[in-house]
Image (cartoon, helix red, strand yellow):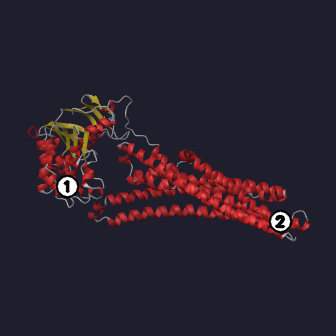
Amino acid sequence: MSQDWKLEEELAQARLDASSLARVGRFLIPYKREVAAALALEVLWCLSHLAGPLMVQRGIDRYLGTQELGSLAALAALYAVNTLGRAWLVGYELKLLTGSGQRVVGDIRRAVFDHVQALCMGFFDRTQQGRVIARVDRDVDALERSLIWGPVTALSAGLVLAFALAAMARYDWRLALTVFACVPTLVLSTEVFRRAGIAAYRRTRADMSLVTAHYAESINGMRVIQASGREAESVAAGRSLIQAVRASALKAVRVWSAYLPVVNFHYGLSGAAVLFLGGRMVLAGDLTAGALVAFLMLLEHVFQPIEELGDLYNELLSAQAAAERVFQVLDTQPSVRERAGARSLASLGGGVEFDAVRLRYVAGAPWALDGVSFSVKPGQTVALVGHTGAGKSSVVSLLCRFYDATEGSVRLDGVDVRDLTLETLRRNIGVIPQDGFLFSGTVVENLRFGRPEATDAELIAAARALGAHELLSALPQGYDTPVGERGSRLSHGQRQAVCYVRALLAEPRILILDEATSSLDSASERTLQKALRRLSAGRTTFVVAHRLSTIRSADRILVFAGGKVMEEGTHAALLERGGAYARLHADAFSTPAGWLEA
């Protein structure tokens, strides 16, 4: 987790860049009519809101102490209508903005998810899945209120504040100056709290991302955690991360809770000054009682918008941090891109050639592959053998173009893979992962994943061709059996059988199989070995091999060590040579794990 912690630390300490919120605002453009309508309603609400003090001033100065009860009643009725109208405006505006907000958040979430789908494997190899989930889920949710209500709140508060100050100046410029005198210190205080607040909110979101990553990692690895008796350590690590979130969140709360009393202090101080000075002016005949009451009501209209802007500022701090994290993903560019003019081929013959290939995953890191050269004829089965980290998986990654070679070239049928469209590669290369990964759903839904248009008859025919029909039919609900998350309801052998049939349905020209290292019962072992032979027939097949039976039946064996091909040949020839392969073979039978370590 150290690398992810470092990434979160860098993001939490990065300089504030308000442009990220402006970029988020672009998602509002498709809904500009709804937002414009809401802003227009907000202007009407502001005017209605400010009309209240003016009505009160008129009622006190003109009608109190007189016998014009009819006029006073009419003014009171108008005041009530104004209040009801303001309530209707708020309700309709809420309906507009809530609907738009959900659509905008949905658009952002789709944009992030679509972009993540297009990223290369390098991004997922170096990024914990919990951090990615946090971007798509929690960070996007944090943008909703500030993105939709932010412009409306800013307009409303700004208009009310401006109109209230103008009305104050109209009533009496001396009292208005008394209020204005508090503004500079309030603005200064706001800036101080803003600086402290953004740091606290960014730290909170960074810590929360690490918690999500730990949750995802723990859930995915629960079988290993419990089998190793490491529950206490996992709980301790989770509690430590949660404590960090709690500490940073409390710091953010303390910043915000200290800001509100500052606003209220300025409000109270201004109110006391206006009441004292205005009262003296009323007694001296320089100001009417109605004007003083209206002035005091307007005073609330000055500091309430400032408080609302403070609330908005508080939300923007959180949204700012979330926006930065969302755009960190959206700004990540895939290192593997399709070249302009890349060729699209309907089918490949299956010839593979590695020419002086070198691969380095990170600049300055050791070479994962160092000068690897070999060629494979169409239809051959090649076993890749070697200890962990020898370079076998790197060969697979380059074949699938999950990464591009740092030096040299990988060619299919004589064409550099970088000159082929990614769609051509994906359509002609089938991969069966070591863990037999399945998606949540039924067996039949997983079988159709690589070829959605396949009929039931074609599914069954493919299963029969691989000798897997009886195995799959024996499941509780046959082909309609739910497999559970990641295929958890099926045995390993059953998962592998589904993966084999899925690969056959896709009809790839090149097949890549990463054999599982876990043991199978003898019946499943025989079924899968027979299925593999049938599946690889007529196809160029690469097997990251862990079983002696697979290795012995391969047309060629490539022995890797230190990112290089140390030896190649058949099983018998390599044993007779007495080199690296022979030593691996001897080691395999002198350890309990056997070829599982190969």
* Helix, strand or loop for disc 2: helix
x, y (%) of residue 587?
Answer: 14, 49
Q: What amino acid type is highlighted by mark number 1?
A: Gln
Discs 2/1, front: 2
Disc 1 target residue: 494
Residue at left 35%, top 63%? 234
Q: Is residue 534 left or right of residue 304?
A: left
* Helix, strand or loop for disc 1: helix
Q: In this view, does 293 lie above or below 181?
A: below
Residue at left 35%, top 64%? 233
Furthest residue toward front: 70
Disc 2 target residue: 290
Quick one: quadrant of the N terminus? bottom left
x, y (%) of residue 319?
Answer: 54, 53
**Res 519 seen here:** no
Q: Is residue 503 left or right of residue 162?
A: left
Task: Please state which of residues 56 and 547 is positioned toward the viewer in this rendering.
Answer: 56
Q: In terms of image quadrants, where is residue 524?
A: bottom left
